[in-house]
Image (spheres, helix red, strand yellow):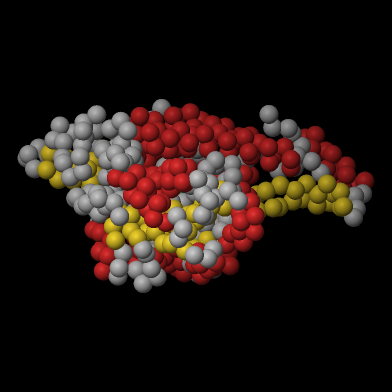
Amino acid sequence: MSSIHLGKIDTSVKFNNQIDCKNYLVDGELKNWEGNTSNVYSTIYTENSKDEVGPTLLGSIPDMETDAAIDALNAAEKAFNRGQGAWPTMKVKDRLKCLETFAGKMKEHREQVVELLMWEIGKNKADSYKEFDRTVDYIYDTIEAYKKLDRKSAKFDKQAGIHAHIRRGPLGVVLCLGPYNYPLNETFCLLIPAIIMGNTAIFKPAKHGVLLITPLLKAFHESFPPGVVNIVFGRGRKIASPIMETGKIDVLALIGHSTSAVALQDLHPNKNRLRLVLGLEAKNPGIILPDADLDLTIKECISGTLSYNGQRCTALKMLFVHESIVDEFNTRFAKEVDKLTYGLPWDDGAFLTPLPEPNKPAYIHELIADAKAKGAKVLNKKGGKLTHNYSYPAVLYPVTKEMNVYHEEQFGPVIPVMSYKDINEPLDVMAASEYGQQVSLFGRDIRKIGPLVDVLANLVCRVNLNSACQRGPDVYPFTGRKNSAVSTLSVFDALRSFSIRTFIAAKDNSYNNEILDALMDSKESNFVNTEYLL
Ligand code: G3H
């Protein structure tokens, strides 16, 4: 382990695998980009060839223009061909084969993608491997979930003298935009179910965590028919906005901020035809009851507030502690925060790691300064210690409604703590909040917990008992109320979100029944079949 202390730069650290990506994938072709490119930097400082220390150049990506983005849209549209394309009408089992091929090829790039996750977004090694492996598992789990769904649909129903063969069909062309904090996992959790259901897609990677997609371009190219997956690089305003303006997008699949989602949605001329699959911001609270087991609570609050430096939509972003235990909680919690190890992402045991957004440390610092000016204190000694790419986690107390950190989704290492006397205080804050993703409830007394869960379940979409908030396991529903989400994602729910129920119906008479029998025997239709997918 190169012992990195906050603020010190290890000049022996180097990035040796610069990637200058000139390719993008449109209409089944890995095209060569000859226009402008943008450099991709890591906020991890290294020494360059001129012996200057600064952000590390990792490579470059095409800075694509609107024309090229529209080409990608046209390719996706052609492959879907208003539902008449080969991909949306293909046998499920043939689509699944493409996905299996892709997952196999993707696995070959594990080490390279993990290295890029660490340099591009500063995710620690263990979590970077976890993100990669979890994504591969997600693909295989999605394949199995679709087989299950298909088996359930491989039958006829009969009601009121009408036979029905009901399946789920694709919606059309999907624009897929992912976030920087899970540039692989969250994007693929949109893209994979979208294409498996027979939709076609245009995918633009996030600003940070973009180079790590480039090793996978070839795998996409070799695994899917032309136009099914189109991958473009560049700025949202030159790519996503003009694509939305055409009105040809059927599904906007985005994990990110509601302001981007709303702006893009507004550009679409036929909003009634636009389905939204959105994972947005949140301000998940931790509520700590007087009888909470403080050892367990502190451990969960550390991981809940600070895993990946708090840059998770599911992170705990506000702690409400009962006034009877707030002093003890604060003292112990602040001590534990100061014990956390900061290091470079590949250092063994590094829990806190550099922030990938160059302006994030300054933003976190502003939140701290604002809170301090309005009466809060930083409870931990190292809290707010600032470097070029980090701001050491600060525990702020007492936080009030007047402070910016009370309202804003900090998405970084600062932990606001409020005390409460009456449980209705945090409940009222949650009810008035713009967000409604999850909550963590710490306590033991079932007479308190029981009625509380009844209310909390209506304020958010997951109540975590004595544990931090999280998305996983990926088979569980991941969604939110208010500004936190639209649609539900999970291995199974995502298949539903990216599809629509559609069926063939026929009156029960000998004329129709003969046709249906013959159809099933002949295998003339990929839709009408009762084959059991193994
Ligand atoms: O950023 C939001 C992610 O979906 C959080 O996922 O709870 O597994 O870290 P996670």
Residue 519: percent from left, percent from top: 79, 40
Q: Using the image as rendered, state which of residue 286 and residue 67 is in the foreground.
A: 286
Residue 60: percent from left, percent from top: 25, 44
Going by the image, does 490 lie left or right of 31? Answer: right
Q: Using the image as rendered, state which of residue 435 and residue 299 is in the foreground.
A: 299
Q: Does residue 274 sit above or below 32 in this rendering? A: below
Q: Using the image as rendered, state which of residue 382 and residue 315 is in the foreground.
A: 382
Where on the picture, by quarter, is residue 274?
Answer: bottom right
Q: Residue furthest left?
A: 50
The N terminus - image quarter: top left
Report the residue at 57% width, 52% height from top. Answer: 463
Report the residue at 44% width, 29% height from top. Answer: 107
Going by the image, does 157 lie left or right of 337? Answer: right
Q: Does residue 448 sit above or below 146 in this rendering? A: below
Q: Residue furthest right?
A: 510
Is residue 83 visible in the rendered image? The answer is no
Going by the image, does 46 lie left or right of 521? Answer: left
Residue 197: percent from left, percent from top: 60, 45
Q: Using the image as rendered, state which of residue 72 and residue 458 is in the foreground.
A: 458
The C terminus - image quarter: top right
Report the residue at 62% width, 44% height from top. Answer: 492
Task: Please give the count of numbered marks on the rendered protein.
Answer: 0
Report the residue at 59% width, 45% height from top. Answer: 476
Where on the picture, by quarter, is residue 240?
Answer: bottom left
